[in-house]
Amino acid sequence: MFQNFKKKTHYFSNYSLYFILLCVIFASCQRTPSIKNSNDDSEAAAKITPSKDSSFVYFSSKAKVEFESPKESNDFKLGVRIQNNKKIWLSITGPLGIEGLRATIREDSIFIIDRINKKYTENSFDTLSRLLNFDVDYMMLQGILLAEMPLKDFDTTNKTMVNNQILIKQKVKYISIENYLNPTHKKLEKLFLLDNRTGHRLEIVYQNYKAHNLIWFPENVSILVNYIDKNTRKPAKTTINIRYQSVIFSYDKLSFPFAVPNSYRQKK
C-alpha cells in the first residue's frame, strides 16, 4: 500500500487514499448486541433530531494520522478543508513535509493527484456506488468528516436510548448501520457498519469533543476495519487513528488549490 520514495521515506498510493475514504464510509463494521429499552427511553429518543450543522460556510483543520494494516504501518499529516455542502479538499504530507497526495471532492466527482508517481485519477460517485453496490454521495462523506450521521433518513421506530446514547439503526441493501449519538450535541460518538454479504465490519469512534464557534467537533477519531484479505483469504484488520488540530469553522473564504501538471498521466 505504501511506496518507497528515495530511501526510508514512505507515502500513500492512490489506492491508499481511496481505502481511507472507503473505510470512513462504505466498509462494514462491528455488530453490537441488542439491548432492551424502556418505553420512556424510546419516547425520549424519538424527540431528538440528529445534528446537521449549517451555521458555517468553511471548515479547516490539520490532523496527525497513524495508519496500520497487516503489511504497513506509518504516520502522516492530513490537511482538510470543506466548503459546506459543496466541496472537500484533502492533502496528505509525508514525514519530510513533502506532499504525496492531494484530493478534491465535489458533489459529482472525486479527483486525486499522486505527486510521487506523477499521475491523477478522476471518478464519479456513481462509479463508486456501482463498484460497492451501495449508494454513495457527497453529503454522506461530508457528514462522516463532521461527525454527523452519514444517512439522514431513518424510521423513528428504530431510534432508542442505550447507555445514555441515542441509537439509530438503519439498513441500506446489504449494509446494516448503527449510529450512536450524544444526546446533548447530537453528534456521533460511535458508528458501526456491517456488510451482511461478506461479514466485513467497520467501527468509527469519535472522542474528546470541543466547541468551536458553538459547533461541536471531536479531537480524536479512531477507525477499525475487520475484513477478509483478498490475497490471503484470511481475516485482516486495519486501524486508523486521527488527532485533529487547529479546527476552524468560519464564514471566511478558503482557497482549495488543485491543479494537475501537464506532465501528469491519467490513471484509469
Image (cartoon, rainbow, N blue to C red):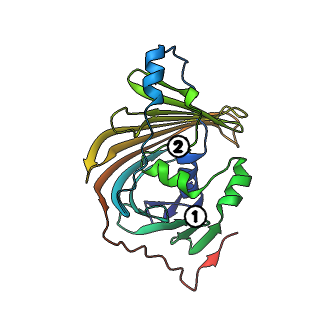
Kindly state the secondary structure of the residue where label 1 is placed. loop
Which of the pair 51/98 is nearer the observer? Answer: 51
What residue is rendered at 55% in x and 18% in y?
34
Which of the pair 160/218 is nearer the observer? Answer: 160
Q: Which residue is mark 1?
A: 107
Residue 201 numbered tag: none
Q: Which residue is mark 2?
A: 69
Q: Nearer the viewer, mark 1 or mark 2?
A: 1
Q: For the view shown, which residue lies furthest in the bottom direction?
A: 262
- Vertically, is 16 above or below 29? below
Report whether 211 appears left or right of 197: left
Q: Is residue 93 visible?
A: no
What residue is rendered at 33% in x and 34% in y?
184
Kindly state the secondary structure of the residue where label 2 is placed. loop
- Which part of the image, by quadrant, shows the C terminus? bottom right
Residue 82 sits in quarter: bottom left
Where in the figure is residue 21, as x and y percent of width and height?
A: 54, 53
Total residue callouts: 2
Q: Residues within 10 Å of mark 1 (few under 14, many from 20)?
A: some
Which of the pair 189/121 is nearer the observer? Answer: 189
